[in-house]
Amino acid sequence: MTTPAPPADWLRLDQQICFSLNAASRAFGGVYRVILKDLGLTYPQYLVMLVLWEHGELPVKRLGEHLRLDSGTLSPLLKRLESAGLVRRERSAHDERSVQVRPTEEGLALRERALEVPRRIAAATGFDLAEIQDLRSRLDRLTTALDRATADGA
């Protein structure tokens, strides 16, 4: 068990969980960049495709909720994916304010090629499956707690 740092050290960079999470995220980004190059996707585009492969057609608003992205961030991603022929955007017949997004046949076919990505990412971490599941569970708990703290005004 690690001894907690004395309060005088709490403002050191290496004591900040936010910095460790940011550094890990940037490192993941580098690995994903290399792995996703073969698919012609960026990491944010890959996340969009993951949601569409899982859920099929969705309104942009729901897609954004899944990804925790606002429409201003999501719209350029969808435009590039549509230009690449991987998704199709259409105004809803029921509500013209709503835009539906769905994967195209080419987008669905890309899923088969993407099946190798999670295995390659897991291998890059050096963690076994149980460690990955434990880390994901802890990060989910952390996210829930931080969302709650934000809603409560921290």
Image (cartoon, rainbow, N blue to C red):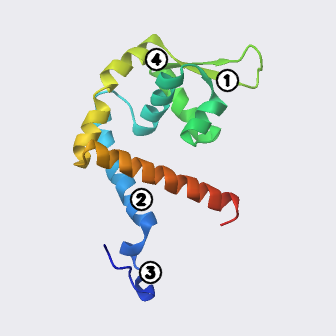
Q: Secondary structure at mark 3?
A: loop
Q: Which residue is mark 1?
A: 99
- Residue 8 vs 3, above or below: the answer is below
* Residue type, numbered disc 2: Asn
Local crowd at mark 2 within 10 Å, few (<14), some, or many (≥20)?
A: few
- Residue identified by numbered label 4: 85
What residue is rendered at 26% in x and 48% in y?
Answer: 125
Point out residue 83 in the picture as x, y percentages from the top left corner.
Answer: 49, 22
Q: Residues within 10 Å of mark 4 (few under 14, many from 20)?
A: some
| Front disc: 4 or 3 | 3
Question: Residue at image x 77%, y 16%?
Answer: 94
Neighbourhood count class around disc 1 (C-alpha, 10 Å): few under 14, some 14–19, many 20 upward: some
Give the amino acid at mark 1: Val
The answer for how far apart the CA atoms under marks 1 and 2 are is: 32 Å
Dots 3, 1 in contact, CB < 8 A: no
Read off the residue under disc 3.
10
Q: Secondary structure at mark 2?
A: helix
Label 2, on which residue? 22
Vertical placement of 114 versus 124: above or below? above
The secondary structure type at the circle numbered 4 is loop
Circle on res. 141: none
